[in-house]
Image (cartoon, rainbow, N blue to C red):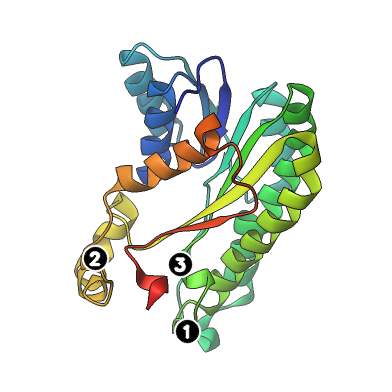
Amino acid sequence: MDLKDKRALITGGTSGMGIATALTMAEKGASVIITGRDETRGASTVEKIRAGGHDAQFIAADFSEMSEVGRVADAAGEIDVLVNLAGFAALAPTADTDEAAFDGLFQINVKAPFFLVAALAPKIAARGGGSIINVSTMVASYGQPGMAAYGASRAAIELLTKAWAAEYGPQNIRVNAVAPGPTLTPALEPRLEMAKEFAKTIPLRRVAEVHELSDVITFLATPAAGYINGAIIPVDGGRLAI
C-alpha cells in the first residue's frame, strides 16, 4: 500500500470521494494533482493535503469542454496513476431526459476520460507503467428507473476499463474500475433519506462511508494490487450479489 515517489492525477478531486482519494493517496506517499471546476475548493483541498506534509497541485478544469482535456494532460506532466473520478449525474426518467443532459453525461463520463487516457497512457508507460482507475456505479450493472442514461454512460466506462486493460496491460499499465453504491458525500445529502431507504435493500443495510471508497481506489493504484487488471470492483455493500 505504498505510493512513495508516485505522481497521481485525480480528476474531480475537489469534493466528496475525490478529496478523500487525494488525501488517502497523499498519505501513502503520492504527489497528487487534482482537477475541478471550482478554484476555491481546489485551493482548499490542496491546503488540506499540504497541511499533512504532502505534495499537492490543483488544475482548474471543466471537462464539458474538450479543449480542457488536452490542457490538463499537458499541465499534469509525467504521472504514474490516473483516477477518472470527475462525473456528471443527470437522473431522470427516459422521457424527461433531453438531448443536452444526455450529451453532457456522455461528454463528461465517457468522452473526456477516453481522450484523457489516450493522452496520458503513453506518459505512464514511459515511466515504466502504472495504474488507471475509473469510477463507475453499481447501476451500470442492473436496470434502475430514472437512471437509464446515467447508467449507460457508466456501463460504457466499464467496457472501456476492460478494453484498456487488454490494450495497455502489455505496457505494464493496469486498468481497473470501482463501482460504488450509495456513499456519504455532499452530492448525496439532498437525497440522503432516499438513500437510507434504498440501503435497506443492501445486505450490509447501510450507506458507505467515503473512506471505504477511497481506500479501494488507492489500493488499486498500489503494488499490492499488482496482478489485478481489467476488474470492476463493486463497493456496494453486497447489492450486486442479490
Of the residues under marks 2 and 3, which one precedes in the sequence?
3
Residues 37 and 27: in front is 27
- Image quarter in which the N terminus is found: top left
Q: Image point 45% across, 81% down: which residue?
A: 144
Closer to viewer: mark 1 or mark 2: 2
Residue 138 is drawn in which quadrant?
A: bottom left
Q: Image point 47% across, 71% down: which residue?
A: 139
How far from the left and from the top, in percent, is residue 191? Answer: 27, 66
Rate crowding at label 3 as few (under 14), some (14 to 19) or many (20 or more) other CA atoms within 10 Å. Answer: many
Residues 131 and 123: in front is 131
Task: Determine the CA span between mark 2 and mark 3.
Answer: 15 Å
Element under disc 1? loop
One can see residue 173 in this view? yes
Of the residues under marks 1 and 3, which one precedes in the sequence?
1
One can see residue 37 in this view? no
Residue topped by disc 3: 138
Closer to viewer: mark 1 or mark 3: 3
Residue 102 is drawn in which quadrant?
A: bottom right
Q: Image point 35% across, 67% down: which residue?
A: 238
Closer to viewer: mark 2 or mark 3: 2
How far from the left and from the top, in percent, is residue 45? Answer: 37, 28
Q: Amino acid at mark 1?
A: Pro
